[in-house]
Amino acid sequence: MTKSFLNRFVLLSSMALGVSACANSLSPTEIKFTSVQTELFATPGALSNAWGDYDNDGDLDFVVTFGNGEIRLFQNNNNVFKNVGAVAGLPTEGPQQVRSAAWGDYDGDGDLDLYVGTQIRPLPSYNTLYRNDQGTKFVAVSDGTALALENVNSRQASMIDYDGDGDLDIFVPDRSGPNHLLQNHNGTFTDVSESVGFTEKRHTVGACWFDMDEDGDLDLFTTNMSGDNDALYENTNGTFSDIAAKSDIGKIARTTEEGGVGCTVGDFDNDGHLDLFVPTYGADLLYRNVGNGIFKEIAAISGITGANHMVGASWADYDNDGDLDLYVAGYMTVDEASKADDRLYENENGKFTNILTADSPLNASDHGIQWVDFDNDGDLDVSLTEGYPEDGSHPLLRSEMPLEGRQNSLKVLVLDSAGNYTKAGSEVRIFDAKGNILATRLVSTGDGYNSQSAVPVHFGLKDTAPVKIEVSFLVNGKRVPHVVDAVDPLEWTGKAIVIKQP
């Protein structure tokens, strides 16, 4: 499918969604987004949303966290959702806002566990790791352990293998103090924050782990509020040092009312290097990775115009044309009330145009944004959360792209050698028959708003010609490639190709 074809659509629900386009870009060919189970997802106060197949039945479920302490677990049965959170052992209320959620198989038993973080207001916070018992029950295992992190103003939790030893460690930013890194030893966690270099106090909200210098281990970018500069921590044998200044990151002058909120990693220009977007209170930032751990800030010249209270963001090729587009969630204050103020930037050869209008039902998030193909049909649906308005919701919108477009896609599920979800931060690249790189995706270490999903990576494709897939696994400080040749996308429509670590 060509870019010219994909530029000629409008986004619709049962009524027009109000997405603008250039005067000559409309045609009868349309892609639609339709609301799914609107009443089920109509509850206000939603903050974080994260997706994963917790019951191992082959389709994607998701959690939504709320300001009243509730965690809802929506089980997917043939694309029909049911809230089973209470039955599964998750709280229906609590004394703190639940501000982050991360899926990962911390104990390597083959099912996804859940870690959530809360904030101090109005009572002392208390984080929780919920062990998944074979998809039937979640059991809190944090009491009396380092995992609880009492009195930490938690934000973007990440379940990642920072030391390359094969199991998942947990990182928790603190908006009110030094950040925390919890090292996993056979299912027992130790707080190693000080010994690895996380001692500085900044107002950290967002965290994105990726191998920014391509040396075989996960480095860390953090976004910081209240005027603090953002940080880029280089991982050297499991210890961290902030090299933001050397990498040309974090030099933006900020007032105490400004700062970075979230972050999302993606190769928007398809050059094989992972780039970085930062929604902020202030001017949003787009860092192009030019190689060797050096980044260049290009938001304004690329068409990124956000300059308000932007909170969450996520890259995705929602139109299946071969490059990454960008959804940015945020809010504005109108008559002393909060109102969603979102962007959907379409990527046209590295230049971005916001095609979302203020009256669009897609303009419905002030926090969470997750792209996900929940119905396994080849296009990306979108899951949002709107936490502040009294009439807010957490809508799920299904993409109704025509079959011609849905076939131009490929999903890759990356697992460890035992078939478990422990490979967050792995990189997936696809190449054409001549060996030219087409696109790069990162196995999620967290984005949206304080959320980490465990889902296949999704590639949109310009055509359905066979491709080569290369997965870069990060193992003991080395990049271990694994290649699958001559993959026919049409053979994988409606399902993911599973690639395990050798």
Image (cartoon, helix red, strand yellow):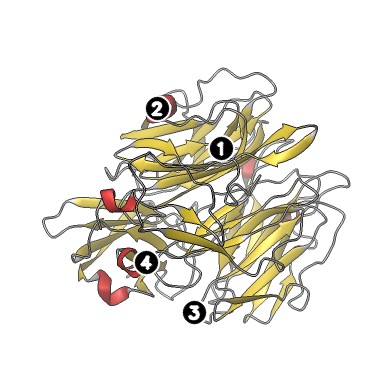
119 shown above or below 142: above
- Describe the element under mark 1 as helix, strand or loop: strand
Which mark sits nearer the N-terminus, 2 or 4?
Answer: 2
Number of labels in the image equals 4
Residue type beneath disc 4: Pro
> Which quadrant does the C terminus fall into?
bottom left
Q: Position of residue 413 (x, y in %)?
A: 40, 68
- Describe the element under mark 2 as helix, strand or loop: loop
Side (left or right) of 37 relative to 382? right
Q: Nearer the viewer, residue 442 or 104?
A: 442
Q: Position of residue 188 (x, y in %)?
A: 65, 64
Circle nearer the viewer, 4 or 1: 4
Residue of label 4: 402
Residue 222 marker: 1
User: Which residue sits at x=56%, y=37%?
Assistant: 222
Residue of label 3: 58
Which mark sits nearer the N-terminus, 3 or 2?
Answer: 3
Residue type beneath disc 3: Gly
Which mark sits nearer the N-terminus, 2 or 1?
Answer: 1
Side (left or right) of 67 relative to 441? right
Which mark sits nearer the N-terminus, 4 or 1?
Answer: 1
Work out how far the residue at label 3 is from the one at label 1, CA to CA, in angstroms. 33 Å
Q: Quadrant of residue 279?
A: top right
